[in-house]
Image (tube, helix red, strand yellow):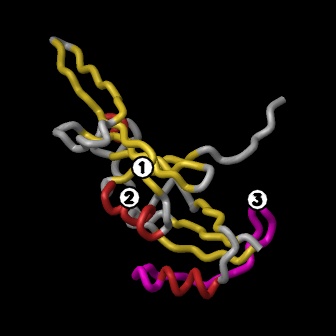
Amino acid sequence: MFEIAAIDHLVLRTAQVDEMVNFYCRVLGCTVERIVEERVEERAEERIVELVEADEDVVDDGKTIALTQLRAGNALIDLVNVSSSLGKSGGGAPVKTGRNLEHFCLQLKAISSGEIYDYLTGKGIKVGQFHTRYGAQGFGDSVYIEDPDGNTVELKSQQ
């Protein structure tokens, strides 16, 4: 039998890659770790799609960015562009109704609820009420916010 150590990554499909990168990096402090481009080649009756790591100096050189991977502590948040072949394989773009993800939680290093509130409202983010909730590391104060696609993100402080 194996033992799960942690969540490695989660994948969010989006039509708003730039807005999502801005939110997760500028507001929540993630960093862009990797960008994967999609190169499509049409051959006779065959369409070949190749995913390749983007050259850091030449991003968006006419190719579609299929995947942007953001570092979130020990995990990754993968943003899949719904207009790429990779993104289209999951269906239509996400909407606020009929979501397949209720929420996910990002554990924060020790910080007060007031500091979290002040920081987020200073960034123009609508902040809900803080509550003590139970998660993987036990009880802690947490709050729900939404990303640009309407995904609910729980921010939970270590006690």
Residue nearest the viewer, comparing 99 with 9: 9
Pointer 2: what residue? 21
Asked if disc 2 and disc 1 are in contact, CB closer than 8 Å, the reply is yes
Local secondary structure at mark 2: helix
Q: Residue 111: name its quadrant.
A: bottom right
Local secondary structure at mark 1: strand
Q: Nearer the viewer, mark 2 or mark 3?
A: 2
Q: Residue 63: name its quadrant.
A: top left
Query: Where residue 40 sits in the image (x, y, percent)?
Result: 23, 27
Give the amino acid at mark 1: Leu
Pointer 3: what residue? 136
Pointer 1: what residue? 79
Residue density around tag 3, few if under 14, some if 14–19, many if 20 or more, within 10 Å: few
Query: Where residue 12 sits in the image (x, y, percent)?
Result: 46, 51
2 or 1: tag closer to the N-terminus? 2
- Residue at 59% over, 68% down: 154
Residue sitting farthest toward the right = 1
The magenta segment is 121-139
